Image (tube, grey):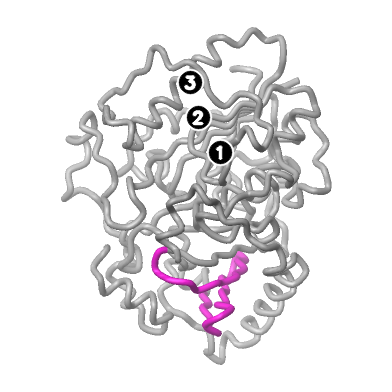
Amino acid sequence: MRNIIMISTDQQKVDAMGCVDPSYYTPNLDKLVDRSIRFTGAISTSAQCSPSRASWMTGKFPHQVGVYQIGHMLDPQEWGIAKEFNRAGYETVYFGKWHLGLSPAHHEFQVTDYRTDGLELAGAQTDPRFHSNKDAVTTAQALNYLEDYDGSKAFFMKMCWYMPHPKTPIDQPFELIDLYADRFPLEDLPIPDSFYQDDLSGKPLFQRERSAKGESHLNTVVLFTSDHGDMQGAHRLRLKGVIPYKELYSVPLILYLPGAKPKRKIIPDLISTSAVTGTLLDAAGIPVPKECEGGSLLPVLERSEPLSDECVFFEHYKAYWGRHPMIGVQTPEWKYVYYLEDDLEEMYSLRNDPDEVTNIAGQPEAEEARIRLRQTVEEWWTASGGFNRPAIEDPESDWLKYVK
């Protein structure tokens, strides 16, 4: 039996790695990339923490399990990845950020705390309220667990860091780590092209209103990803929200699979992060159950090129800057978004406009594709249940104040 480790960050966009963009410094992540398979077409199911994480736990889209936004609780009666690993005889371990109400233990993770001796802050904040401090604790727990591991039982470990997410949702900057403060002079940091190219004309009004505020070699499988990205100034916006751009939805996904001989080292196929759950089970040799609708990415390793009809769906409900429920579909050529309550559309030609600057919904040359894509995404939404699954609000969450 293989050991399985899933590592995730919070709010890291797909190119926020030194091996992709040298303005980032990620030496350890780059080493993992060197020996792994990198998926460059991974699309988050939702660009918000709780809904995206619900997909990781269940292999479903957020609306299918009633986690539409931050502050909604994942029903502990729902099928989940820990339950399946437990049935297969694994020890299931969870350290770090949860953000799904109750606790990992309520979802049958067996180990959710561990010793932290040897904790090394390495320039991180000593205040336990800061994300860098929390991540140092998480890392110490994971390293100590691995040091104590005796091999008697295979394990599935989920280690989830809070960073690089800023300390609070709206008004705080990203955390400065003194150890690295001199490495990134402000004048050397790149600005996204769309900051200058996109005045948000032709886009939904609420996006322009936001912009106007000036916010701008072990037998162990390892999967690394992030729940969603960050705007980082693209389209004159920062952080996240109910907006459809690649900076939020394209996330890193790296898979280290011992013994694998994939036909491609870098895989650009469009894939959904709802496949994370099934991939972890599949990599462990555990049959992927029907409940895990996102399937597995391992069959993708056998392909020499993308499927001709590939597409991936995504959704968002409500965030700090208002309620604008949207559903979307992305293909190699197009991105289409429909706002369910606002009755607005966004559509981009990804081949001609990769930065998603010009909204061509309503333009005659795109009309045939618009009709087809809207039908596709509406059929998916209806077939997958739409808003039929009621949400459970987490009474312990203080995040609801930001989204109500």
Above or below for 14 versus 283: below
Nearer to the camera, 70 or 36: 70
Q: Quadrant of the C terminus?
A: bottom left
Spatial distance from mark 2 to mark 1, Cα to Cα? 8 Å
The answer to whether residue 287 is above or below residue 114 is below
Mark 3 or mark 1: name the one nearer the start of the chain. 3
Q: Quadrant of residue 315?
A: bottom right
- Image coords of residue 182 (percent x, y): 17, 35
Residue 181 drawn at (x, y percent): 20, 36
The residue singled out by tag 1 in the image is 254
Name the residue: 33% across, 60% down. 238
Instruction: Calculate the distance from the C-alpha at mark 3 to the C-alpha at mark 1.
Output: 22 Å
Name the mark on residue 141: 3
Instruction: Name the residue carrying label 2.
Output: 32
Q: Quadrant of the N terminus?
A: top right
- Amino acid of disc 3: Gln
Q: At 50% from the left edge and 47% from the top edge, which residue is drawn? A: 396
In the rendered structure, does residue 345 fall within the stretch colored magenta?
yes
Circle 2 crowding by C-alpha within 10 Å: few under 14, some 14–19, many from 20: some
Vertical placement of residue 322 versus 308, above or below: below
Q: Secondary structure at mark 3?
A: helix
Q: Is residue 141 visible?
A: yes
**Cα distance in 3D space between marks 3 and 2:** 21 Å
Tag 2's secondary structure?
helix
Give the residue type that dot 1 points to: Ile
Q: Which residue lies most toward the bottom here?
A: 364
Question: Could you tell me if residue 41 is visible in this image?
Answer: no
Residue 397: in magenta span: no
Q: Nearer the viewer, mark 3 or mark 1?
A: 3
- The residue most toward the front is 395
Q: Amino acid at mark 2?
A: Leu
Q: Which residues are magenta?
A: 320-348
